[in-house]
Image (spheres, helix red, strand yellow):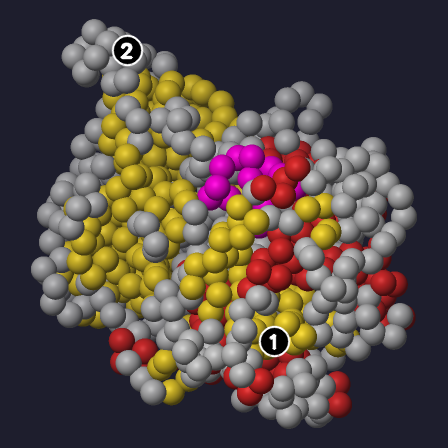
Amino acid sequence: MNAITAADYYDLRQVSEPQLSPDDERVAFVRRTPTDDRSHEATIFVVPVGGDEPTQFTISEGVDSQPRFSPDGDRLAFVSTRGEADDRQQLWVTPTTGGEARQLTSVVGGVTELEWSPDGSRLLFSQRVTADDRAEDRDLAVDPDYEPAEPDPRVIDRMVYRANTEYADGRRSHAYVLDVEAALERDADLREAETGDAIQRLTDGDEDHISPTWGDDDTIYYAVKTAAEGVHPDDSLRYELYEHDLDTDEATAFTRTTGWATELAATTDGLVAFEFTPAERSSMRQTEVRVHDRETGTETTPTASLDRTIGHRCDFAWAPGGEALYFTTPETGSRVLWSVAVGVGVGTGSGADDGTSDEVGSEEPTRVYGEGVTVADFSVGENAVALVQSEWDHPGDVFVTTRGGTETHRLTRVNGDLLADRAVRQPEEVWFEGGTVADGGAGDGAGAEGGTDDGVKGGDDGDGGDDGDEAETQIQGWLLTPPEFDADAAGGPDETYPLVVEIHGGPHAQWTTAGTMWHEFQTLAAQGYVVFWCNPRGSTGYGEAHATAIDRDWGDVTLADVLSGVETVCEREFVDEDETFVTGGSFGGFMTAWTVTRTDRFRAAVSQRGVYDLTGFYGSTDAFKLIEGDFDATPWDDPDLLWEQSPVAHVAEVETPTLVLHSDRDYRTPANTAELFYLGLQKHGVDTRMVRYPREGHELSRSGEPGHVVDRLERLVRWFDGYADSREAPPALDRERDAGLSGGLDESDEE
């Protein structure tokens, strides 16, 4: 049995987007596999619900996604980059009984949000295009060789002008309908202008039209970002929901919602589900699902009784008959599936759905499935639910369960051959008492108390803060031991292991024993480290009070809980309490930096994709509303708070060797604040290095180029090894830049 390595990433297969066929007999899904250091291949597979092996359904060329069965099950629509030199996603359709796939679009903006009409005659999709694209009809048909010119200079008028890894450059999201038969009958040369005749542009203008979805065959719903008079739309959290009548080509606004974004899902009889988050300090509030009845104009909130949020990689969908809504939530270290009956008269006080009430209502939600697992994607059929789930012993496979969750079958083992030869350890669940924040609290430098011998570093006096009453909070965490660990033999001086502490991003997110961190956790353990992670206050999955406990204090409250967990696990005889290390990404990167400014508890640190200066972050990110919500502040009305809550303000206190990792095209946590923190470390004589990953964005650890994913993990281990007395390895700064790395990153990519 071999240990898991960082380079195993090249052989790991990821599954996503399960889609049940209308007869509940098959599940289509996407399988994604690295092909070289820079690229992945994503291909659609189909697996019978009865349990036979999955079969490859699309050719291995480019990146396929969004498989969608037609309502009669005879066709499968999907999106692919095959044959396109510029990687624009185009719409394809193939018979499910066999035969070649046909490309039905050649549009400039790429195809997303694909959905069949109820009668199967049309396909709805979105694309992001400019006003010039629409004026020249490039959103209907474009030569595949067309390449838009890079703006020079780039003129910016919006507040949010870049996201993910791209600048908007005038592109807006718009909705389109394609007539499938008309598209299939036309000439195969999609470069001809008349081939766009099969596509109808539904929306126009300088606004984003998001989450389009079918109601009945003649009705489409979508959301449009709006704002009050005098407010910039990018500074607004308000969305108007529209009903678009295809017969008249007229759109009518029918309700409004607020939140960071909103997804829509509708039934054929006019029930429209959408996300709602209160606008006031929105990032500190839980997201609900609301349902609007177009016939009566009434609304209900079927998730209202749950003290859980819908959001951060969660989803919702109607059952085929529209009688129930399914959704996922974070839940105490799992991500679980719920269902709730929704309809006219349901749960409105009139008893059963007997027609005595004309208001839409709902029953209490029922937890269907998912305790102890992470449900990533799901698809609801007539009698079954297909889903992708990961667990402690695998990073993700396709499963099917009954609508009530009473009987479940695993349909794939995409990494079975690899894992059969790898030692995978099961994490141990650990509950512990949350830490306390010293008097003064938020941003005053008083620090967090975790019971360490080193204590915490002091600072300037401040205002506000907690008085320690939160110490009774129970925090959930996990401890993962190396493959060779023997619980019965542990305890001797030669049987102790160094500890790596991982801190999650968000901050309002949740870690489990699986999901996207599975490979990283198992790799660190395989390298001889005990790995500890937890969901401190600020995390989701434990109720709104838990998630909002970091109000105006990201650093010290979270650190108090993390340090309390560290002291708890260091009581184990096999953990070397003198060899502890810390890392995290995004908010976890912020917390890693905050930690080394507050305590010398850790031998070394690796801060990844972090936020280090809240004011600099506010001015450069697409998520500045996070600062307004979590801190109730802006750089103009409370600059001192944001400065004191920033790791760079306290960089002079750092003595811990700290590696800084960042992506060059990360527009969620832009590199400017990482550069400032790194400069501060250098100025104060701290062992440090910055590694920058070209072409990468904020999702580096989850979906970056394979060579970069592997390089990041290996650098993380190498940095820790260099400061561990138990390892015979010099510090990374004393070695050749690429010594100890398996490759995948050119010397020219590193400064």
From the viewer's side, name the closer residue of 557 and 632. Answer: 557
Looking at the rendered structure, the secondary structure element under dot 2 is loop
The residue depicted at 19 percent of the width and 10 percent of the height is 355
Where residue 223 appears, as percent x and y from the top left, is: 46, 32
- Across and down, in percent, residue 44 comes to 27, 64
| Amino acid tagged 2 | Gly
Q: Is residue 116 above or below residue 304?
A: below
Q: Is residue 383 above or below residue 477?
A: above
Mark with earlier residue (2, 1): 2
Residue 101 picture location, percent across and down: 23, 63
User: In the image, is residue 537 part of the stretch drawn in magenta?
Assistant: yes
Q: Amino acid at mark 1?
A: Asp
Residue drawn at (38%, 87%), measured in percent from left and top? 2
Does the image show residue 74?
Answer: yes
Along the viewing direction, whichever of 398 and 2 lies nearer the viewer: 2
> Tag 2: Cα neighbours inside 10 Å, few (<14), some, or many (≥20)?
few
Name the disc covering residue 349, or none. 2
In the image, residue 11 lies at what x, y percent?
38, 79
Q: Is residue 577 above or below residue 562?
A: below
Magenta region, residue range: 535-550
